[in-house]
Image (cartoon, rainbow, N blue to C red):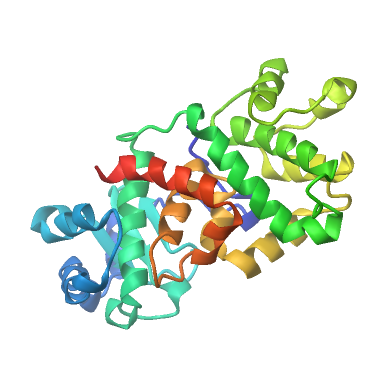
Amino acid sequence: MVIKDKFELLNKIPNLLNVPPATLKTLELEENSPRHVFTFLTLKQKHIKHFSKDKIFKFVGNLEERENIKVIDFEKYPLAITLNGPTKNIIINLKPFDVEDVASLNPSDLFASVMYGYGFSKLINKQVKVSDSYAKPIIDFLTSLLVRAFGKEYGLTEIYSAGIPKLKFLLSCYIFSAFFGYANNDKLLRKAISVAPYNYQPERDIILKYDYKSINEFLKALSELKVMPGIKPHGFTTKIYRWYGITLLAGFEDCSRFIMAISAASVGGSKMVPTFISKFNERAFGQIVEITKKVYR
């Protein structure tokens, strides 16, 4: 599994922070301490229903382990959850929630944030590994989401649309390359057709000219190969951000973040990622949730 360094669609912001301990301290407030996170979550414990609940409450209930959580207000960073390299802390950034303290945060969002941060840490630190054997439900779900978001605009709404198999095939090239590290060669194409059958041979040379590690190159392929003619990174980013939020937008570029975004979408009452996205492809969504359960065993 590849860990993205910077996000192309988010103005090259880093996936992980690199903030010195002294600077991180200046971004913390006493009312947002790990103890406060534990207290406010415990008040709503009975109302939270999620497969990760036991693991997360065990985590925040452990005095030593919960000190790894740092709640900050970092205006220059647009994502709600990340890790800080120098200190190894799980970072919950309140800025995207537009609140100043954890007491003002929706309890479901607070739980989803801690759950996301805990899982993200496990994946980034390779304590839990996700192999390319899990690519198919990711590809199936994202195909459904892209058709839902862009289908009418690009004529991909009909079940027999010729563009959908090609979309899924190119998306498979992107996922196997950007998420799982496959190089741009015939092996990538063979891997892609194993989950997304498509006769690529007449276009082989053209298809391989794009660097599928890059989401901008993937979007360029969708445009120039006439799947979504004229689509640009700005238009793609704007629609995904407006419809599904920045947490899922970041998940389009990083496997760990995508998996955690799906996990967040399974938390009832949370607005981190819209829960309605599960309806786009319930089978694939459920299969991805099963992958996330590995993190919380």
Report the quarter where the C terminus lies: top left
Q: In the rendered view, tell whether residue 45 sits above or below residue 125.
A: below
Instruction: Tell me what residue is drawn at x 29 percent, y 54 percent.
Output: 51
- Number of numbered markers: 0
Residue furthest left as drawn: 63
141 or 272: nearer the viewer: 141
Query: Horizontally, is 195 left or right of 114 in the view?
Result: right
User: Is residue 114 left or right of 95 when viewed as pictured?
Assistant: left
Q: Residue at x 78, y 48 (%)?
A: 159
Figure quadrant of residue 116: bottom left
Q: Relative to 94, say whether 59 is above or below.
A: above
The vertical placement of 49 against 230, above or below, is below
Asked whether residue 15 is in view, the answer is: no
Q: Is residue 266 something one can see in this rendering? A: yes
For this orientation, the residue located farthest to the bottom is 104
Residue 263 placement (x, y as % from top left): 41, 54
- Spot occupied by residue 151 in the image (x, y as percentages of width and height): 78, 56
Above or below residue 24? Residue 164 is above
Residue 262, given in percent of the width and then of the height, sits at 47, 53
Residue at 88%, 50% in the rendered image: 229
Quick check: 156 left or right of 285?
right
Q: Quarter of the image holding residue 127?
A: top left
Q: Which residue: 47% across, 55% down?
A: 261
Q: Position of residue 99 (x, y in %)?
A: 39, 81
| Residue 203 falls in image quadrant | top right
